Image: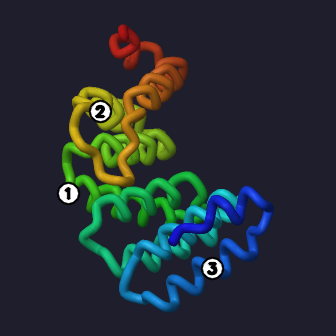
Amino acid sequence: RNLAMPYLALGLKAAAVSTHETHAKNDPKTPSPLLTLAQVYLLSGEPKLAIAAYSRAETLSPESWGIANDLAMLLNEYGTTQDDGKRALDLAQRALTLNPEAPSALDTMGWIHYRRGAYDKALTYLSKAAEVPFTVVFSDSDDPSAGQQTLVATSQLHRKNSDSFGAIITV
């Protein structure tokens, strides 16, 4: 049972961590407790520990595009080394290979390219994420607000390079 939010709301971070670490140890072949533990770490401001928990979950479910995508996003956002960046790109590519039309996977790939300064590639992926109809039933890790995020990203891209991105800001 997920007790992360009640524990965290009460300021009981140690209890939230302990409970979900115990769940992960008691069910070592299931990624779910690790994913919840990762959320506890993220909500507690510990992204490196969240990355470690997601990494363990990813080894248990290498065919999960959602886990690969979420780990790629975390590595892109909080990674500090070139290896983190390369791993983020590899994981995002795997997520897209497994589910090529997932808006969140397209969005993640766009943000990875954006962070690398590859604005044309970023725009390609972010635009495609915004084009996917949001009436599709999404995976539990998909975010139907990808279109709104894409508009924000496109606006930022437009400010950086108005010649290349002007046509996109017509929504």
- Position of residue 49 measured from the top left corner of the image (x, y, whole percent): 62, 72
Query: Helix, strand or loop at disc 1?
Result: helix
Q: Nearer the viewer, residue 159 or 53?
A: 53
Residue, disc 2: 124
The residue located at (47%, 54%) in the rendering is 73
Amino acid type assigned to the residue bearing label 2 in the image: Thr
Q: Is residue 93 above or below residue 168?
A: below
Distance between mark 2 and mark 1 Cα atoms: 16 Å
Quarter of the image containing the C terminus? top left
Residue, disc 1: 97
Q: Which disc is residue 19 wearing?
A: 3
The residue located at (49%, 91%) in the rendering is 26
- Position of residue 31 measured from the top left corner of the image (x, y, whole percent): 40, 76
Distance between mark 1 and mark 3 Cα atoms: 34 Å
First in sequence, mark 2 or 3: give its number.
Answer: 3
The residue located at (37%, 64%) in the rendering is 67
Residue located farthest toward the top when viewing the structure as drawn: 170
Query: Helix, strand or loop at disc 2?
Result: helix
Amino acid type assigned to the residue bearing label 1 in the image: Thr
Q: Is residue 55 above or below residue 166?
A: below
- Position of residue 161 measured from the top left corner of the image (x, y, whole percent): 48, 20
Q: Quadrant of residue 106?
A: top left
- Tag in front: 2 or 1: 1
First in sequence, mark 2 or 1: give its number.
Answer: 1
Counting other residues with Cα less than 10 Å from the Cα at mark 2, is it few (<14), some (14-19), or many (20 or more)?
A: some
Distance between mark 2 and mark 3 Cα atoms: 42 Å
Q: Is residue 61 left or right of residue 17?
A: left
- Position of residue 130 measured from the top left corner of the image (x, y, whole percent): 31, 28
